Image (spheres, rainbow, N blue to C red):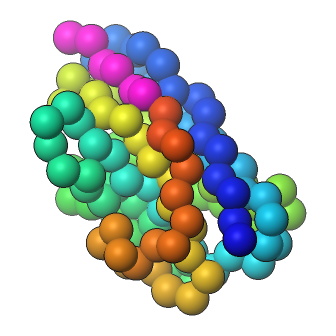
Amino acid sequence: QVQLVESGGGLVQAGGSLRLSCAASGRTVVYAMGWFRQAPGKERDFVAAMSWSETDYAASVKGRFTISRNNAKNTVYLQMNSLKPEDTAVYFCAANLRRIGRQDDDYAYWGQGTQVTVSS
């Protein structure tokens, strides 16, 4: 089992930055960790993911968001720059033991989510 706890959400003006963190506990070896987001009334969408060997970003955030990992701390980060109002959503951290992907089904473990609100 893997437990995930996100932090770092909040309210920011358009053009600003936030850094989200997701700390994993329980099983110590996690192959892939990712971020998804869900805006009100919409489905949950892929944002970014990172495995031991690759990194992947959604087109809508590429060049503005950066995912990184600190394996010693079992923590994944999402640095979000040049934020836009359309980035407003609940951001979820996800983890999987064997593969990286862009679909919800690719991940076995999920955090509770953290709210990010970008004002115009």
Q: Magenta stretch containing residue 99, yes or no?
A: no
Outermost residue on the left side: it is 41
Magenta-highlighted residues: 115-120
x and y percentages locating residue 29 in the rendered image: 76, 78
- In this view of the protein, can residue 46 be seen by the observer? yes
Quarter of the image where one finds residue 90: top left
Q: Quadrant of residue 84?
A: top left
Q: Compare residues 34 and 112 and report the one nearer the observer.
A: 112
Q: Residue visible at 41% across and 41% down?
A: 91
Residue at 61% in and 82% down:
97
Residue appearing at x 69%, y 66% in the figure: 2
Q: Predominant secondary structure in magenta?
A: strand
Position of the N terminus by quadrant = bottom right
Side (left or right) of 113 relative to 48: right
Above or below residue 66? Residue 118 is above
The count of marks equals 0
Based on the displayed image, in which of its 4 quarters is residue 24 positioned?
bottom right
Image location (x, y in percent) of residue 16: 40, 20
Q: Is residue 119 magenta?
A: yes
Left or right: 92 with respect to 52?
Answer: left
Q: Nearer the viewer, residue 85 or 98?
A: 98
120 displayed left or right of 33: left
Q: Is residue 77 above or below residue 97?
A: above
Q: Is residue 14 above or below residue 6?
A: above
Q: In which quadrant is the C terminus drawn?
A: top left
Residue 30 placement, left or right of 108:
right
Q: Could you tell me residue 23's position as x and y percent?
A: 71, 50
| Residue depicted at 42% across the width and 14% down the height | 11
Q: Position of residue 85 (x, y in %)?
A: 21, 23
Placement of 84 over or under 30, stated as above or below? above
